[in-house]
Image: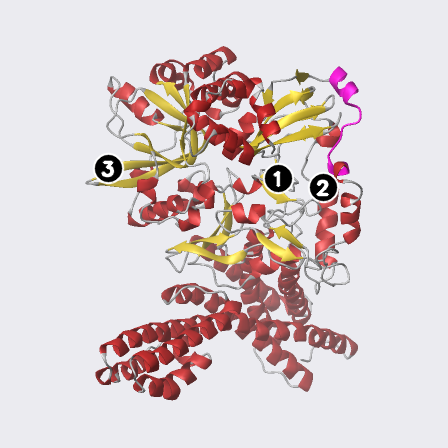
Amino acid sequence: MNSVLTRRRMIGLSAAAVLIAVLFYGARLGPAALANSREITGWVLAGVSVFLLLFNVRKRIPAFPVGRGYYWLQLHIYLGLFSGAAFLAHSEWRLPTGVLDWCLWLVFAGVFVTGVFGIVLSRLVPSRLNARGERVIYERIPAFRTQLAGEVEALVLRAVQEAASSTIAELYVNRLLPFLSHSRNFWAHMLSASDHRQALQNEIHAVRRYLPAEGNAILDEIEARVLAKDDLDYQYTWQSLVKGWLLLHLPLSCAMIPLVVVHVVINYAFGLGGM
Amino acid sequence: MSEADIALILAQPFFAQIDTQAFPAQMPLADILSHDSRIVRYEPGEVIIRRGDYGNSLFAVVEGTVRVLLQSPRGLQRRAPGQWRRWSRAFASTFGSRRRVENRDLARYQIQTGGTPRAAYTRIRDLDRIVAETQTVPLGQGEIFGEIAALTRQARSADVVAETPVTAVEIRWQGIRDIRRFARPVRDQLNDRYRDRTLANTLAREPLFAGLDAKVIEAIASESLIETYGEEDWYLRLQKLDLAGRLEQEPVIVAEGHQLDDVLFILSGFGRVTETVERGQRTIGYVRAGEAHGLRELLEDLQSGGIGLRRTSLRAIGTVNVLRIPSTLVEHHILPTLAPGQLRPQQKSRAGEDSQRRLDFIVDGRYMNGTATMVIDLARCTGCDDCVRACASAHDNNPRFVRHGHSEANLMIANACMHCVDPVCLIGCPTGAIRRIEETRTVAINDAACIGCQTCANSCPYSNIRMVEIRDTAGKPVLDADTNQPIIKATKCDLCFDTPGGPSCERACPHDALIRMDMQDPFSLLKWIER
């Protein structure tokens, strides 16, 4: 796992490279063999696309012995890369001309790009999730956030009653309440930046000089919860990415099916050769 | 229990031998019997004990005759579902309603629960034929049975059926434990019975004794000591135990530096193997039922000439039953038959900083109990929840585990049933709904027999059993007719034993981050983590 180029990955990439080479060689040989290379690459691309879609079918039938999800994903990744090359071969490195073909082109590009994004994400996310705070179940994050907000509110009330301090209450109303009420700093967490965290801590520390000893003890507890909330936001950001990217990849993949069907029908109806 | 009942029990031969004066004033024998025993009656043909159940009680026959069936009749056998049922279950879970959660066909329950309470007893109608055709053992007044499973927490090894109208005393294990503690003759008698009835057969099934003939095994059984260490109800207190102090609380079975004059064979439970590092103890491994401690040390000593001192200590984790086999017997009979590589290499030979922490984590959390522990590699897990969805899809649209749990570095033990070696959840199930399927070693719940008493959920030391409110096929909550409260059922991971593919969670993981692992060998876990 430490090396980027593991043995398995090398085998997968090599196999994809060989397939791509065969495809391009076949496409070049097509006219010489009196075959339509576009038709060949088109059907290869359609076949591969159908297989890629079967990964989602595999996920929906977990009770059947149809192979481990891991091997399906590996095939999905490498055939996905191959499909990118097949797409280029099929389009002969040219941009489309008609509306339908433009739609198909854009949708395929969207599927491919989101797919690559998914690969990168799956490599990045585990280490990111382990980097800060405890791994929390995504659906439970709002409940934990609410719990932390409630605890901070109780501490602020305690500060007002026990330490007779309104400074903490002001800090809470002006700065902490907006921070605690929702998930914050999405982009900062995505970039693993910590400026906002430091700024928040600075603001908390800035009021210490005005507080009595009891107030400082309460502020310590508040600060711990604020940092915990920030960790929760961090977890939320990365887990949202994991959940969210599929909302792009999957609908685009499904949208491709009717477009491909129409594309095939039109091409056979009006003669092969034009894209 | 009335005073007359107590007097009846005390008049039985097994109890008559007990010196009541040996019991402390605050815990007299009569009180123990009053709290932990009852008088039960069975009609002819009714099944008292069923093979494969994890019983927690001993029976003494007061009146009548029972038959021990050494071969289970067809109707009593519990088998894993056949291929046809697995495939039909897979179709039903895949193509059934995906919107409804925890739906149950209530007609199934009505068949199960109809009639009088007596009708719920399993009954064998052609007992005479079975007695005539198969091997059985009659037990009459004054005889006891069921003590082995109750004491060693092994599955019941035979069916016991009432042959005539039977009155019996049933004592649960807490009562047996207390009686054994104060009445030495009872302890000796139970150990002797275990030795006579079961030990040789148990040993013959173990790989360590595979190369020995029956006479040698019997000699080993008769010349070895049976000992019990630790707390029998450890599982009720695991969550409350202080992690740092666990090692100190575990009783020492054998100590480092003592004479190596016997080898300890673990009959049930777990032991922690430690060695002294300055003034503390470092965990270097663990042993489970079927494994031996001291064997490697003895072999090394013999190879280097002469028997030496123990180089490691063994401590009881929970309750441990051990067989103390004299070194001379091991040297002459067992060692010559061992195949190369049969002895597990010592943990410390590979222990690095990380693997030591992982080992401590496994032993302190008592995760070595698992035969199918859900281990998640956090260096690969993206939290995509494909495992959770797969589990939900295979189980009434409600996952049977939580993808969360204790973790150490990149290793997480998720909250999923581990299908323990010592399945304490089976103790005390009043209907036998939770049971172990012998062929697959899977612990599963028979939903139709579950009455929602929560005994199993409360006993599980890892909090891996959950109670759910059930709904009918129309999606409406099912309410109890008397109390108007929702009916609840115990649910847990069943390793998808009734579907053709096996554990859906493991097969669904697209990142190879989840595995169901037998924790018998810590090396396999370390190897998987470091793959």
Q: Is residue B128 magenta?
A: yes
What's the amino acid at mark 2?
Gln
Above or below: residue B216 compared with residue B155: above
For the point 45% across and 12% down, which residue is it?
Answer: B219
User: In the drawing, what numbered circle is on residue B276?
Assistant: 3
The magenta-colored residue range is B119-133
Judge by depth and name the residue closer to the eye, A34 or B87.
Answer: B87
Residue pointed to by mark 2? B83
Q: Position of residue B230 (x, y in %)?
A: 40, 34
Q: Position of residue B150 (x, y in %)?
A: 54, 30
Residue pointed to by mark 1? B435
Above or below: residue B92 compared with residue A83: above
Mark 1 falls within which chain? B
Q: Quadrant of residue A196?
A: bottom left
Q: How is the image coloured?
A: secondary structure
Dot 1: within a 10 Å radius of its alpha carbon, few (fewer than 14), some, or many (20 or more) residues?
Answer: many
